[in-house]
Image (cartoon, rainbow, N blue to C red):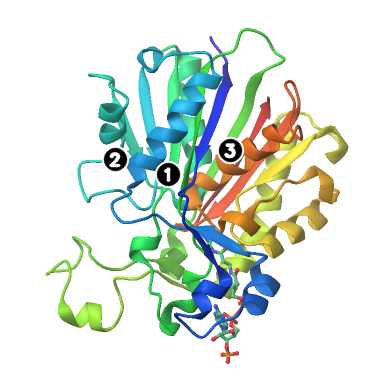
């Protein structure tokens, strides 16, 4: 049986910076409120015509280059998103085309903020079984074209940013660089506490003037409930991974890269597991919540800053809509 490793990582965010002040000119909010509750100072939103495929393709090219490979070496693309470019087909095929690839399989997955962890687990299983050798795993999101920028949507709109991150996952050649474990979970009993109801095939018609007048084509969230679940599930997922890998002390972990939903959530998780602040990297301040893209965007920055070095023991952990959550432990 083979084992897998992360061979290269890339990221791309749109150049358009949207500050908290910019948002306060469109809705009743303030820089102070947003920073105090979430830590977010600014986020990137796409410009006219820029798509999730565009962001993903740029992030992917960097990941492939850093892996020392060519696009032609990729034999599967996994694309995690909650904001596909179109209802169908999935977005991975557009990235395949943009990278100049032909015929390799393309798989879109829909696990929201946990999408990247789910994608890693799928890639890891395919590599372990020998079915595929080199997998491009992407998290890419364009939220901004689907957010309510009026005061009615302020609780959600201030949180989200656009961006993409990608990794190339290949066969491990030694035990110093390898994906050690992935653990994924879901609980659909409260699926509607964070969702977008329209347009939907479960509704006939899929979208209507009435639904739009009620703003049901925008995401809605019970923020307090989501917050409580996040600060329970993320520590549990970290502990689960530690136990599976025989990690007896939190000190053995070199860096935690949590999903970037809210700085306060991550600070609370850090305290709960006894992780010193310098061993948990966050960059939500600059990018907001980019859902499936947040972990690779954050890990990429940590690598660039030298906070993650080859061979380090890194814990990736996420929680999101569905509800879904999970962790991955990686020897970088
Ligand atoms: O990846 C998963 C995605 N989501 C999350 O992880 C989010 C988890 N939840 C949260 O991060 C927090 O619940 C929020 C940051 C979203 C909200 O913080 P909160 O402390 O739960 O605030 P709240 O919803 O209870 O709202 C408090 C007040 C309300 O006003 P009243 O009713 O007290 O008069 C809101 O209307 O703040 C108001 N409010 C705002 N004010 C200014 C809500 N959004 C805003 C805003 N600016 N953007």
Quarter the C terminus occupies? top right
Q: Position of residue 306 (x, y in %)?
A: 75, 32
Q: Is 314 left, or right, of 290 in this rendering?
A: right
Residue to which mark 1 is pinned: 140
User: Of marks 1 and 2, which one's residue comes earlier in the chain?
Assistant: 2
CA–CA distance between discs 3 and 1?
Answer: 21 Å
In which quadrant of the rendered view does residue 216 lie? bottom left
The answer to whether 112 is drawn above or below residue 53 in the figure is below
Name the residue located 40 percent from the left edge and 42 percent from the top edge.
55
Q: Is 250 left, or right, of 132 in this rendering?
A: right
Query: Does dot 1 land on a helix, a strand or a loop?
Result: strand
> What's the mark number on residue 91?
2
CA–CA distance between discs 3 and 2?
Answer: 25 Å
User: Of marks 3 and 1, which one's residue comes earlier in the chain?
Assistant: 1
Asked whether the residues under the numbered discs 1 and 2 touch, taking CB atoms below 8 Å apart as contact, a structural biologist would say yes
Query: Does dot 2 land on a helix, a strand or a loop?
Result: loop
The answer to whether 320 is drawn above or below residue 314 in the figure is below
User: Of marks 3 and 2, which one's residue comes earlier in the chain?
Assistant: 2
> What's the mark number on residue 183?
3
Return the residue nearer the eye: 260 or 190.
260
Return the residue nearer the eye: 114 or 37.
37
Image quadrant of ligand 1 equals bottom right
């Amino acid at each position: 049986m083979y084992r897998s490793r992360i061979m290269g990582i890339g990221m791309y965010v749109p150049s358009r910076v949207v500050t908290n002040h910019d948002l306060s000119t469109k809705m009743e909010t303030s820089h102070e409120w947003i920073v105090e509750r979430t830590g977010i100072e600014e986020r990137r939103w796409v410009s006219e015509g820029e798509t999730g495929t565009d962001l993903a393709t740029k992030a992917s090219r960097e990941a492939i280059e850093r892996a020392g490979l060519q696009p032609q070496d990729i034999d599967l693309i996994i694309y995690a998103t909650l904001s596909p470019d179109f209802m169908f087909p999935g977005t991975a095929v557009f990235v395949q085309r943009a990278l100049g690839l032909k015929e390799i399989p393309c798989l879109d997955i829909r696990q929201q903020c946990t999408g990247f962890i789910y994608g890693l687990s799928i890639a890891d299983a395919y590599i372990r079984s020998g079915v595929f050798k080199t997998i491009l795993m992407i998290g890419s999101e364009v939220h901004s074209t689907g957010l309510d920028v009026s005061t009615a949507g302020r609780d959600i709109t201030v949180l989200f940013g656009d961006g993409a991150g990608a990794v190339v996952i290949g066969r491990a050649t030694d035990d110093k660089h390898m994906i050690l474990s992935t653990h994924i979970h879901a609980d659909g009993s409260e699926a509607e506490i964070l969702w977008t109801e329209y347009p939907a095939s479960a509704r006939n018609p899929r979208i209507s003037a009435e639904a739009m007048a009620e703003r049901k084509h925008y995401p809605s969230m019970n923020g307090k409930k989501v917050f409580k679940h996040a600060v329970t599930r993320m520590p549990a997922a970290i502990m689960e991974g530690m136990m599976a890998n025989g990690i007896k002390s939190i000190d053995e972990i070199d860096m935690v890269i949590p999903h970037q939903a809210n700085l306060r959530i991550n600070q609370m998780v850090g305290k709960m597991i006894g992780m010193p602040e310098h061993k948990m990297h966050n960059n939500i301040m600059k990018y907001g919540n980019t859902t499936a893209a947040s972990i690779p965007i954050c890990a990429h920055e940590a690598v660039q800053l030298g906070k993650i070095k080859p061979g380090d023991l890194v814990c990736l952990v996420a929680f999101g809509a569905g509800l879904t959550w999970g962790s991955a432990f990686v020897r970088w």
